[in-house]
Image (cartoon, rainbow, N blue to C red):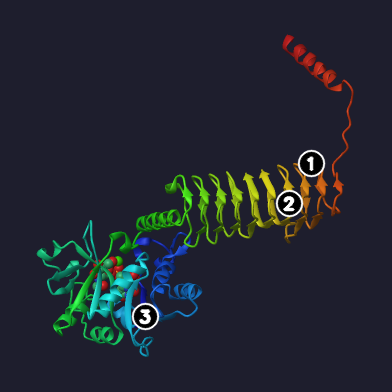
Amino acid sequence: MPVAVIILAAGQGSRMKSDLPKVLHPVAHAPLLAHAMMAAQSVADRLVVVAGVGADQVTAAAQEIDPDVQVVLQEDQNGTAHAVDQARAALADFDGDVIVLYGDTPFVRPETLQAMLDARAAGNAVIALGFEAANPGRYGRLVVDETGLQAIVEAKDASPEQLQITLCNSGVICADRAMLFDLIAAIGNDNASGEYYLTDTVGLARARGLPCAAITCDESETQGVNSRADLAAAEAVFQTRKRAEVLANGATLSAPETVFFAFDTFVGRDVMIEPNVVFGPDVTVESNATIRAFSHLEGCHVSQHATIGPYARLRPGAEIGDHARVGNFVEIKAAQIGEGAKVNHLSYVGNAEIGAAANIGAGTITCNYDGVFKHQTVIGARAFIGSNSALVAPVRVGDDAMTASGSVITGDVPDSDLAIARAKQVNKPGLALRLMNKLRAAKAAKTKE
Ligand code: UD1
Ligand code: CA
């Protein structure tokens, strides 16, 4: 059966106290909306996002995540049923099941959505996703009896007995497309909020003698974001889940609770990640690599058996080859580090290509920026760059070439040559001691005065 997912993302999110629409706030470097869309994509053939507040920004973000998404507009936020109704025309030609998700409830698992679809296939008209709430508060309550789901009652409209129910409504609902829009057409707004409640689809279906069901999941899956504190809690939920996934895939994390991943971090088998490592977006770490403590990686690729850190920073475009080593206080940006090359201490390598087995000495700087343009530094295979070399790009150091330490290299160095680009050393015999004695005598004369 084909599946369409409607993501509600029109709400104001006023408790965020932000100029940014709520669903565009990030968790693990991707907007909440992207997390919801990724969850949807696991089951959906069609995706519709309902935008309202900040519609231009929300539309642009949705299309960037999935160019095939349909975005519809809800001008006024008159309730969740009214929001879903805005997708009526967009799905007029669609035959199949529809799942409604919230853009601010990003962590529903694919397995949970599949369980709802299975309950649909078993003949239920409307399926709601519920959870046992630690604090039922203002959540809608699922009224369930031996015949299945009877109704969803909003907290504001609930009787004191109904408020005792702890099985709460996550907001996720599943129904056949034609049935869903048919039920929505019958929903009124005669309730405590004066809104059109999507939750009323259950009572209406039951009144027609149609069976409904509740599927349950863990509360962490339905974690909604309404405030900055909720956003931080959502980040924690994501990180806990991602750490478990990385461990399950065969990586070692010696202190998992101190490692922070992005939504798309890829970590291969037998990777070792030491404490306090932070991943920005778009990082791939291949098998058997080691990421040592306090390193920060984003937009980069680490190949097999490479070692990064401790205290290394890999910025976008860093490509670290097999068995290469990037050590402490080294920053790499837009640069390829060849197989087995070493950049072990206190260096900046930007806009560069480092050949296989090259050795970049401590304190090497690629001077890649002239204030307007970026320039490239190319270092050949097995080259040896002496400590404290400044490589003024554009410049090329050939295969098997060397630079003397302390050199400022402004011209190309041919293969196998040694470049020395610093003042020649001059020794003045005995001068150090004579100078020191003179200074000490001056100090002694001063204290006598
Ligand atoms: C809703 C449910 C409630 C459930 C709770 C879970 C209804 C009537 N109630 O209540 O049973 O326990 O979610 O969090 O459905 N939205 C729109 N347009 C609108 C209204 C809402 O796009 O006109 C979006 C919001 O941006 C949000 C979601 O729908 O992402 C839920 O809306 P919200 O107002 O937060 O619903 P609740 O009152 O919390
Ligand atoms: Ca809410």
288 relative to 174, above or below? above
Circle 1: element type = loop
Real-space Cα separation, disc 1 to disc 3, in angstroms: 64 Å
* Vertical relation: 425 (above or below) 80: above
Secondary structure at numbered mark 3: strand
- Residue 175 is situated, as x and y percent measured from the top left of the image, at 27, 80
Report the residue that reaches farthest toward the left. Answer: 161
Seen as rendered, the residue at the extreme bottom is 93
* Quadrant (top left/top right/bottom left/bottom right) for the C terminus: top right
Q: Any mark on residue 5, and which?
A: none
Depth check, mark 2 against mark 3: the one in front is 3
Q: Using the rendered view, name the quadrant where residue 34 is placed.
A: bottom left
Q: Quadrant of ligand 2?
A: bottom left
Relative placement, left or right, of 152 versus 372 is: left
Q: Residue at x 42, y 67 (%)?
A: 35
Q: Which residue is mark 3?
A: 4
| Circles 2, 3 touching at the beta carbon (< 8 Å) | no
Question: Who comes first in sequence, dot 2 or dot 1?
Answer: 2
Q: Label 2 sits on what residue type?
A: Thr
Secondary element type, mark 2: strand
Q: Is residue 186 left or right of residue 425?
A: left
Q: Residues within 10 Å of mark 3 (few under 14, many from 20)?
A: many
State how far apart marks 2 and 1 are (Cα).
13 Å
Closer mark to the observer between disc 1 and disc 3: 3
Q: Which mark is residue 406?
A: 1
Residue 316 in percent (x, y) is at 61, 59
Residue where numbered disc 2 is placed: 366
Q: Which image quadrant is residue 13 in? A: bottom left
Q: Callout 3, which amino acid? A: Ala
* Cβ at disc 3 under 8 Å from ligand 1: no
Residue 439 % position (x, y): 79, 18
Residue 224, position in %: x, y? 33, 63
